[in-house]
Image (cartoon, rainbow, N blue to C red):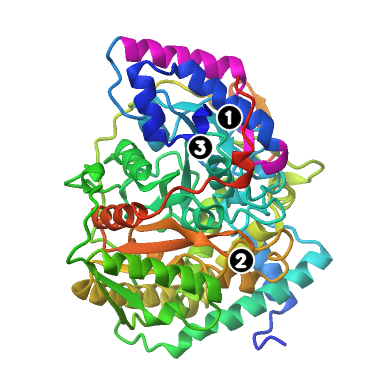
Amino acid sequence: MAKNVISDETIEYVGILAKLDLSGAEKEQAKADMANMLDYIDMLNELDTTGVEPMSHVFPVHNVFREDVVANGDDRENMLANAPERKDGCYKVPKTVE
Amino acid sequence: MNLMSLTAAELGKKIKSGEVSVREAAESSLAAIRERETDVHGFVTVVDEETVLAKADEVQRRLSEGKLVSPLAGVPVAVKDNMCTEGLLTTCSSRILGNFKPTYTAEAVLNLERAGAVIVGKTNMDEFAMGSTTETSYFGVTRNPWNTEHVPGGSSGGSCAAVAAEECSYALGSDTGGSIRQPSSFCGVTGIKPTYGTVSRYGLIAYGSSLDQIGPVAKDVTDCALILEAIASHDPKDSTSVRREDYQFTQALVDDVSGMKIGIPRDYFGKGLDGEVKEAVMRAAKVLEEKGALVEEFDLSLVEYAIPAYYVIASAEASSNLARFDGVKYAYRGEDYAGLHQMYKKTRSEGFGAEVKRRIMLGSFVLSSGYYDAYYLKALRTKALIKRAFDRAFEKYDLILGPVAPTTAPKLGESLADPIKMYLGDIYTISVNLAGLPGISVPCGLDGNGMPVGLQLIGDCFQEKKLFRAAYAYEQTRAYRHCPLAQKGVSEA
């Protein structure tokens, strides 16, 4: 039995963040999987990390800038060729504003 | 003579001298693929013969005009299916990208093409590189050519199986937590994950961006050094790309380890490690010692914390990186939806497999408000501690030596039921990605069932040359073992 308990509300909320629609069975599985993973991850609490800076990058690299100049050609037709739906040279999506 | 049983360097030499034509090399690869794919299934896409041969002829022309000097010119290569190839299907072994034809080619692949490589196909992988067995591919499992009842490892299982089965001369893989080294170990081939930033990630479909690196998979260390020389470059299109002072990796192919200091982490040889794997790895350490290296044991520390830290960081990055797959720009879109958000959800729920969804959910959770500090930042602090532990080790040692994985390749169908158990298999590889280090997997024997065991050498950042030198010296003591399936031979085209 997992120590962490994931509620229906949490799974619902995470589903919204993740933009995933889980079936009833998938939700139950996700609750169990996440609880098990969090139990495992809680192992990190054994470590004293007081005063340790979170390390997002292993090298001291900084922002890399370049001039904002177009270097590639017009690739619209090839890019749109991957679109599930298109219209008048644009991506077509369901109505977004009422 | 079967051209695919040669190393890439050997075949490249024969092409250069005119003994073998580029077309013959390409035909030999395609013939091997035709013969062995039913057993192995290493490829998602095999390039059609006409295209491959046209490319081969073009490379031959450039060679004869003296425009190609690379030792890899004309040698057939397979590319993992998470690297964009212009006009050629790039699926990440996912339903959601099942129809995706990129409009540009990944920088690493472009570098190979500039060197005159001939791409024969795109290799199978765990969906979006999430997995350790290549069983999470939407397009079916890849089988280990040493024994087709076993997995090839993952996530670059297709690349490693294709190289071991001698369907191509070498391949590109990618490594986020061990995805080049572990399948290389399971398939008895050699693979290296370079220092983070060495190979451009431009055009590599992102999983965990701070951890992902592209690297070579080949028959031996020499090939790996040659390939890395060809694909490594500073790329302004990848903001994490590093400009290195020295790209001359093949200079390190010297049979001399005298005076090299090699540390063996005691914590890599504890419980969970298979006895036969341990024995093979310790024998390899002995070989290096007999060749003059100074080998000693030490305590690395923090080893078991790398896995939970990794799964927090990699899942967090994945949840963000995979947000782009929304049914608008790429191939797959769900059907029967009401409105935009329903369309997103439907597309993603149908398009992603179980393991990918599991990681996106976990990643979304650890980044959500209220949990960000406790999980995500905690993992990043742990990563800093792990990096420090390696820094301390490299003050004393040139290299760290250990196993690649706790066991040899498991049987198909045994791993996916218990995710955490599967994740534990990454224990020796994963911290290398967290610390940005280079690591190489070299075959070091077979277990009692005839399955390959891999030796891992880990170097400090930018110390690939030390890895190549030690791996090369070790390799000189043993011959390359062809897998039984490849030894069956193939009817020459």
Mark 3, other Cα within 10 Å: few <14 / some 14–19 / many ≥20: many
- Horizontal side of residue B230 vs B106, given as left or right: left
The CA distance from mark 3 to mark 2 is 32 Å
Report the mark closest to the observer, 3 or 2.
2
Q: Residue at x 36, y 78 (%)?
A: B265
Q: Which of the numbered marks, if any, corresponds to residue A22?
A: none
N-term mark: 3 or 2: 3
What chain does badge 1 belong to? B
To the question of a shared chain for discs 2 and 1, the answer is: yes
- Horizontal and vertical percent position of residue B178: 48, 60
What chain does badge 3 belong to? B
- Horizontal side of residue B258 vs A22, given as left or right: left
The CA distance from mark 2 to mark 1 is 44 Å
- Horizontal and vertical percent position of residue B486: 60, 40
Label 2 sits on residue = B448
- Residue sitting nearer the eye, B383 or A84: B383
Q: Quadrant of residue B429?
A: bottom left
Secondary structure under tag 1 reads: loop
Q: Which of the numbered marks, if any, corresponds to residue B101?
A: 1
- Residue sitting nearer the eye, B222 or B46: B222
Q: Residue at x 52, y 73 (%)?
A: B369
Label 3 sits on residue = B79
- Horizontal and vertical percent position of residue B391: 25, 72
Amino acid on which disc 3 is placed = Val
Mark 2, other Cα within 10 Å: few <14 / some 14–19 / many ≥20: few
Report the mark closest to the observer, 2 or 1.
2
Q: Is residue B261 magenta?
A: no
- Horizontal and vertical percent position of residue B302: 40, 81
The CA distance from mark 1 to mark 3 is 15 Å
Amino acid on which disc 2 is placed = Gly
